[in-house]
Amino acid sequence: MSADRGFYIESLILTGPGKADAKLAFSDGLNVVSGASDTGKSYALSCIDYAFGASKPPESIPEGAGYDVVVLSVIARRTKEKYVFERGLAGGDFKFSHFDEKSALIDETVLSAKHSPTDPNTLSGVLLGLCDLYGKQIRTNKQGKRRTLSFRDIAFLALVDEERIIAKRSPQLSGSPVEKTSESEAFRLLVTGIESGVAHAIPSKKQTLGVEAKLELIGSMITEAEARFSTTGVNRETLETELTVLETIRTTALCEYEGARLKIASLETELAQQAQAMRQTRARQQVVKGLTNRFTLLDRHYLADTARLQAIEESGKLFEALPSKPCPLCGAAPEQQHPHDQFQPGNVESSARAETLKIGKLRADLGEVLKELADEDAELELQVGKAKAELDRIQAMVQNELMPRVKESAATLQAQTGRRDLLIQAKGVLSQLENFRAHETQLLPATTESPTAPTPVTTSPTTGEMDSFANSVQKILESWNCPDVGRVVFSEDDQDLVISGQSRISHGKGVRALTCAAFTVGLLKHCRTNQLPHPSVVLLDSPLVAYREPDSDSEDAEDQKLRKSGVKEAFYLSLARGDANGQVIVFENEDPPDDMNGLFTIIHFSRSASGRYGFFPV
């Protein structure tokens, strides 16, 4: 079923460190992103094109400073699974995430941004696979040379920017003479669903002479290559075997070298940590020793104080032992003296004993502290010893075990480099010889083909297929109320539409923009209606260019006629009711008519404090 092919875009997100996400959410069917100039509409379109595999990132704008990743989410029509593509604005490949219809992660990998004719696991391969187009062939020149279709060929037919939409050339062509054949063939592939056939051209006499000259040149190049190979002295039969052996030796040596180098780096880190730990332990030891010295000195003071108190206590006892005598001041006899006014040696003794007990308790506490400091110092000394032993062990391992391994593997690599380079050079010469001989084999039949040989006919669209496409465009233009729409046909000579007998590009830019949009939407409608492969997505930038603010000096009669015929209203109404039969995303300066709110998704950039300012959050 055609409805099962392709996908629709669910969202576009720009992210950056410390930045609020810039996000646009789309629905299947018609989506309109409207607003004034310089609000990020064209930038958003460029981001989608970049996520579709364009080689150049969007041009930098001030509002995009700090944003560095584009994230595009699409929904597969056939399975309803979600495909998320992330790409850095600096370029490179894609991070790809695949989710089922219930948003459960199925797979996560990296996809190459470059198309591959043999590997479907690229961005182009995944998107073409969703459209049933992977592996299709298109011609690239009139001689019949072919290549596989890339999604960039299809994206060109589905995404139209504001410059192309008014260009004076066919919508399917970029203007490059080199790409004209492949662009036309990609368009024909979508119109017909049939890939390009093989074409054989019979060479003329002049071409045959040219081929003979090429053969002569190739012959001389083969002779020269053979001479260069002989100077290498390499045996052709054993070259691959010898190179394989050398590569094995080299790989082993590289692994040994890298393993030893990483081990040394790890040990150096450990060495630094051990040295730091030992320095910290030494520093604590110095603190402990300083405290021990100070507390030892304090203990000595306590001992000296105790000795003085003991002397005082002994002196008191001596005073008590002395006989009583008359007072030396007043001469009073001992029995006539007042005891309470006399000196009492016993009081001195008791005070000295009390102070001695107090100092004893302090000394006991100090002794505990000194013991703890001594134990800590011993433990720290043990830690220093262990750290030093570990340092010596690591240094010995580096010097005696790892460094010899590094030197040995480096010497092995150096010894093999010269011979390996010679073998690689010889292999390159052999590869050139194979290419020259293959080219020679391809050219030889051209010198012997008969000029009367038949030429196979290439497959090309029938008149009915092109008429069907042109009819789809005609219906689209009619549904848009485009004035003076007669019969629409596709001109093989001009590779463009002829509308009412007049070439499409002969009209003014307003009609060119509208008919280019009809060409693109008509191709989508034709493919979906006839169950032909197509992404089922169309993106248009400024298709209603004639409806911008009118300039009386530049607006021509055609633009005025378009304005009066109600094209704008009919354009949105037609796409809103599904005439395109797929997803259409329109980027336009002016808003759709107010009475159409609710019929389709509208994202308005206000460029003011009210509503959404633009693509980037303010």
Image (cartoon, helix red, strand yellow):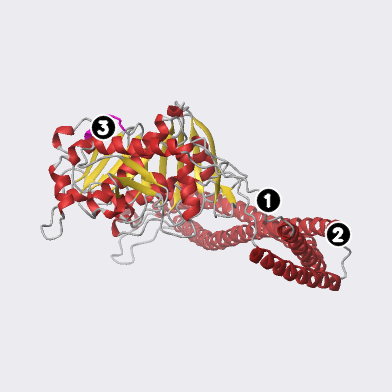
Measuring from the top left, give residue 437's x and y in whole percent: 77, 61
Residue behind mark 2? 242
Residue behind mark 3? 576
Identify the mark at residue 453; answer none if there is no mark. 1
Q: Amino acid at mark 3?
A: Ala
Q: Amino acid at mark 2?
A: Glu
- Can you tell which of label 1 and label 2 is closer to the viewer? 1
Viewer-side residue, 379 vs 588: 588
Decide: few, some or many residues near mark 3? Use Cα within 10 Å; few <14, some 14-19, many ≥20: some
Q: Quick check: marks 2 and 3 in contact, CB under 8 Å?
A: no
Question: Relative to residue 519, is residue 228 drawn left or right?
Answer: right
- Helix, strand or loop under label 2: helix
- Can you tell which of label 2 and label 3 is closer to the viewer? 3
Measuring from the top left, give residue 576's x and y in whole percent: 26, 32
Distance between the Cα atoms at labels 1 and 3?
Answer: 56 Å
Is residue 357 something that shows in the picture? no
Q: Amino acid at mark 1?
A: Ala
Q: Which residues are magenta?
A: 573-579
Viewer-side residue, 103 vs 238: 238
